Amino acid sequence: MQKISGFPFENWLLDRIVAAKSIVLMTHVGPDADGLGSQLAFCRAAELKGIQVRIVNEDPLPPRYRWLDPQGLCGHFDRDAAILESADLALIFDANELQRIGRPAQRLKARGVDVWVVDHHPVAPTLDVQGCVDIDFSSSGELVFQLITALGWPIDAGVAQGLYAAMSFDTGSFRFLRNQSRTLRVAAQLLDTGLDANPIAEALFSSRPRGEIELLGRVLQQLQFADGGRLAWVACDSSLTEGLDVANDAIGELIATLIGIEGVLVAMMIKPGRQPGEHKLSLRSKTAVKIGHVVRPLGGGGHDHAAGATLTGELAEQTRILVAQLVQEIRRQQPEAAGQV
Ligand SMILES: [Mn+2]
């Protein structure tokens, strides 16, 4: 059964967090700046209040986010599973499905610990979810800002760094705000702590490893278009990264470049998954077309304009079906100026 408090938070939610003796934070596998920044901010705010909160993710801190965690607060399952044994409340940031969290969530559930979520993604109606979910928030970071504030915990420049990184990452450097002025007001409050936003912007958006740029070159060579240029897509096998020093998740981030092409309404990228025989589907779309519902029959999830799923089975056939389906979606939602395949 679901028990969810959006913003403003209900007392049952705040009281549970206050009553907890030992809180553990988790985020999804392949952690990003929203999940990690939210965790580190919550940890530091708790520390300023004299409360110890620990982080145990499935994955270790990715090297590109080391600047975000100078104190080394981010724990991971293979090294820090023992921390889970004393937890009496676990909070998942930036996801609401247990299977996206990996072993830390399984271990806590097996112990009968409350595992609650703090998230801004839509929750499937069939999921048994408790905690704080509000899809009107730009990022988990913005929601965690409100949570820290509601708990009465302090926000100094150290706390602000994690929250600002989280919000900046999920809004594409404050470009994707819809009409939510609150996001910018929160960002302004974070800067008022004395936080310098420039190093964060540089670390997030101006420090791509060379291998990633070389990889982008290979992706662009395989790039295909459909529907007169309204769909851009690429489906790559493991040979794409051969000889390059890049993390597997670096491929997924290149989709931002594909959706940035003029005239492209939907971008699709398929890359090798974590397990042999698996592929990871990523979709992005511009405002004119919604694609979130396309991944749901595949067991995937996400937002209206950014979604993903794990594919199993024959790559070429699934790719063909998805391309046809996305072209159909584009034509249904934007019938005027229909292009040609
Ligand atoms: Mn997020």
Image (cartoon, helix red, strand yellow):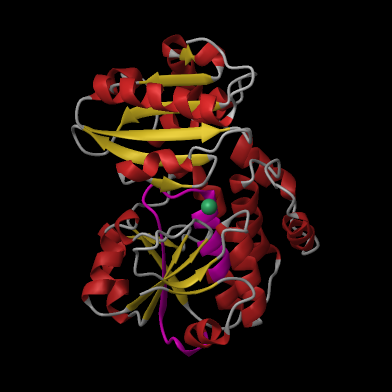
Q: Residue at x 44, y 20 (%)?
A: 233
Asked if residue 212 is positioned above or below residue 97 in the image, the reply reads above
Up/down of 19 relative to 243, above or below: below
Instruction: Judge whether residue 29 is colored magenta.
Output: yes
Which residue corresponds to the image point at 45% horizontal and 9% vertical from the top-left? 221
- Residue 153 visible here: no
Quarter of the rendering containing residue 243? top left
- Where is the N terminus found, in terms of image quarters? bottom left
Q: Is residue 339 visible?
A: yes
Magenta-colored stretch includes residue 308:
no
The one nearer the camera, 173 or 1, is: 1
**Residue 153 image-quadrant placement:** bottom right
Quadrant location of residue 46?
bottom right
The residue lying at 26 percent from left, 39 percent from top is: 274
Residue 111 or 207: which is nearer the viewer? 111
- Measuring from the top left, give residue 313's x and y in whole percent: 19, 31
In the figure, 273 relative to 303: above or below? above
Image location of residue 284, percent across then percent down: 51, 34
Give the mark count.
0
Q: Is residue 272 left or right of residue 155?
A: left
**Residue nearest the viewer, comparing 24 with 137:** 137
Q: Is residue 282 above or below residue 226?
A: below
Look at the image and give the residue range highlighted in magenta. Answer: 18-42
* Residue at image coords 45%, 14%: 223
Q: Position of residue 64 (x, y in %)?
A: 49, 41
Between 103 and 177, the one nearer to me in the picture: 177
Where is residue 65? Give x, y as percent: 51, 47
